[in-house]
Image (cartoon, grey):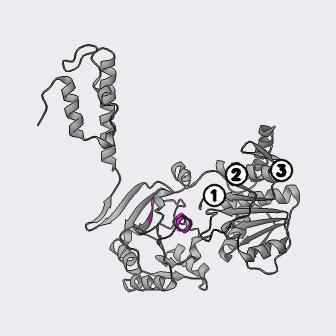
Amino acid sequence: MSGSISGIHDAAVDRLAGSVRIEPRDYQKRVVARVIEMFSGPHVDRKVELPAARSVLVESPTGSGKTVMGLLLARWAQETLGMRVVWTAMRRNLLAQVERENRDRGFGVKLLTVSMFDRHPPRGDLLIVDEAQHDATRSMASLHAAVGSSKVLGLSATPWRADRLGLCFERSVRDAGIRQLVLDGYLSPFAHYTINTYSPESVAATFLREPARWGRTLAFFRTIAECRACAGLLTAAGVPCEVVTGSSDREAQIERFEAGGCRVMLSVAVLTEGFDCPGLETVFCRPAGRGPTVQMAGRVLRRAAGIAQKSIVQCQATSHPFTATAPPAVQYVEAAEGWRSIGLNDRVERTTARMLELLVRLSRSESRGGTRDGAAVGETPAFRGLRRVRPWNYRLEEARDRFLRRRGAPRQR
């Protein structure tokens, strides 16, 4: 029964995406089908049959296409159930983004977009909450009551809060995380850099030493004063930059940045949500916990033609290195002589692979009863004597001496 229901919802997703000018990814289709199943009626979750959900939270990383998933679900609610759809977000650039995506991609949803702080929002049947980690606020409680929706859909990359306020969604759906999306190629590979200290002076100095390495850059600080201090140092060195605040003209600033008229943008929190610029090459992340770090670093992970690898810069004092969330392609730490790689380079990996291949070939040859270097027929393969040794804890000289002793050759000094 469950399989047939899932098949029906999968077909519904294909129909919804049929006339849209974008090809939904496999994980997006799975998420949309699962939410439709939860909203439609009884469904099984962890081997327990549950009634139809009134509210569902979709947890999906920055750059995974939450807007696409939300619009597909809005289209389903409107076409299948005749629902009036209200879409809310904290920042006006997020509302402008969903309206643009709805229009340009041909979703055709009749959306009513409102700010989370709107005191007189329109009534609706489905309320979609973008950046749903803000849903626990008092202003959102008032908005829920005013909209009076029968269904609520939350979208968030980081559905946890530092103030420990709980999000009240009946169900949640997760699929691919940042790690998997990076490995699958949906998000960009990145290099991770660790600097010693994080301050306006250290960030400016790091950027100015190698501006070509960083390209178009976004830097986050704790205060506007720190943003302006760093911007002053960069401007004095001839680097065009913008400080983006809640009262600045963000749309014009972002347009200049995307057009190349601005090289660096600096912000406290405004650009942690809803800022999507595939041409962004580097993000400097201020020391922060898991949620803010994932939001800041996620700004740079969108893939872009001509940019093979992005860069994420943090400092030693951060409580959440982004490497704990996703694997970097390469990792560097700041040193007196420049950057020091702390991962295996390609040459080491190739040499290791050749050594392992040689040992495997030798082991197979001897296990077939052959002779090599005077070894007796049927002698235990040399490889077997090493199989319990972990290569990363075993010195090459020790491995060589052990190998030669098994051959009866004198130990080399």
Disc 1 + disc 2, Cβ < 8 Å: yes
Q: CA distance from mark 3 to mark 2?
A: 18 Å
Relative image position of residue 68 (x, y in whole percent)? 69, 59
Relative image position of residue 319 (x, y in whole percent)? 47, 66
Which is more N-terminal, label 2 or label 1?
A: 2
Q: In the rendering, which numbered label is found on residue 31? A: 2
Which residue shows up at 33% across the image and 50% down it? 345
Q: CA distance from mark 1 to mark 2?
A: 9 Å
Q: Residue furthest right?
A: 82
Residue 391 in the image: above or below residue 141: above
The magenta region covers 285-312
Residue 164 in the image: above or below residue 175: below
Disc 1 + disc 3, Cβ < 8 Å: no
Amino acid type of the residue that numbered disc 1 sits on in the rendered structure: Ser
- Seen from the viewer's position, the closer of residues 39 and 85 is 39
Q: CA distance from mark 1 to mark 3?
A: 24 Å
Which residue shows up at 65% across the image and 75% down it? 93
Which residue shows up at 62% across the image and 71% down it? 163
Question: Which residue is denoted by mark 1 in the rendering?
Answer: 60
Amino acid type of the residue that numbered disc 2 sits on in the rendered structure: Val
Q: Secondary structure at mark 1?
A: loop
The N terminus lies in quadrant: top right
Residue 317 in the image: above or below residue 309: below
Which residue shows up at 48% across the image and 57% down it? 324
Question: Which residue is denoted by mark 3 in the rendering?
Answer: 51
Q: Residue furthest front?
A: 164
Label 1 Cα neighbours within 10 Å, binned few <14 / some 14-19 / many ≥20: many
Which is more N-terminal, label 2 or label 3?
A: 2
